Amino acid sequence: MNKKDNKNNIYKIIIIVLMVIIIGLIGLLISGKVEINKKTKETVISSKTVEEQSDIKTAISKVYDAVVYIQVEAINNRTLGGLQVSSGSGFVYKKKGNDAYILTNNHVISGASKITVTFINGKEVEATLVGHDEFTDAAVLKVNADDVIAVAELGKSDDIEIGDTVFTVGAPLGKEYMGTITKGIVSGTNRMVNVRLDSGSYIMETIQTDATINSGNSGGPLCNILGQVIGITSSKLVGEGVEGMGFSIPIETVNSIIEKLEKGEEIERPYLGVQLADISNAYNLQYYYNINISKNVKYGALLGYVENGKPAANAGLAVGDVVIEMDGEKIEDSSHFRYELYKHKVGDTIKIKYYRGDDIKEASIKLDEKIK
């Protein structure tokens, strides 16, 4: 091997060593970049977590002192001593002059002979019921403005989206746990929930959340990340054995009638003069109403009774007719019928489609009477 070959071999070795070093350096740089990115990502996630925690704490502080515990005494001759005590939550939403107003659920104060409100600082005062409505499950109480610690801000439930952070404040299981916070997300919007009322079944449009709602939370606020009230929580809408599904009445639903409730005015709803039944139970239809419906009818609200001289009868409806559509909206059952009907005001005219036997007919009904 000559000197020239030795030099070439040396050059080759040097080149190989340099390539190994360069490859190693590139590998270290790539590894370092990944690690930097990883750390940056972790930092961002941590920052977001801290930011949300800060936001939720600020939001809670805005509404916390406005929430109250409500104790209700009602006369019930079936209980020992004839007195029944129940409880729920509520929140101050308005001050005007010497008065302050509290929102809660209608079912919380139903049948009340005495209503006692406890503020977060422990002060107890007697409240006056000024207005309530069964179908929105809303009620307004009045107390002296000087007793109020804070007033909650009302937001807009129309602005919420699935996945938004929400929280509740209330008194689950009673006064001992008043001021309890539960946090979750909006699990669903415009959820239609069937509710059993004293006057029959009814559908309510609700906000669904996975924030825990127990019996004592009824009437308390559902709030967004800004601390604004977007709904009134209601344990009445939660079925037995159901977990992770809470429901709240959208604040817009209550806003539409809140001025009338504050004034103690009646909430007028149209009256048709009919008794409704569901078509799902053929035995009940035959036993109670002596009615057999056509096999073509798959859904709708059956008229089990039609009062003479009232709007439905005046429009030509009769016992045994099954209403399947109202103003273009499909009517699933009797609860849905009431829901669609009560969207209208006294004086409106509605158009319906209905089965009479195997025939589909149409009618216009003038809503010229109200529920008394």
Image: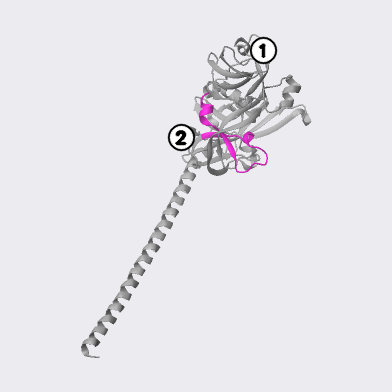
Query: What span is in magenta?
Result: 230-256
Q: Does the stretch in magenta take in 298?
A: no
Residue farthest to the bottom?
Answer: 1
Quarter of the image containing the C terminus?
A: top right
**Residue 301 drawn at (x, y percent):** 63, 23
Three-letter amino acid code at the position of disc 2: Asp
Q: Is residue 22 left or right of residue 155?
A: left
Closer mark to the observer between disc 2 and disc 1: 1
**Residue 370 drawn at (x, y percent):** 59, 15
Pointer 1: what residue?
Answer: 307
Is residue 130 in view from this perspective?
Answer: no
Pointer 2: what residue?
Answer: 159
Q: Please, is residue 5 above or below residue 253 in the view?
A: below
**Residue 336 drawn at (x, y percent):** 60, 26
Q: Residue at x 24, y 83 (%)?
A: 8
Three-letter amino acid code at the position of disc 1: Glu
State the scheme by which the image is colored: one colour
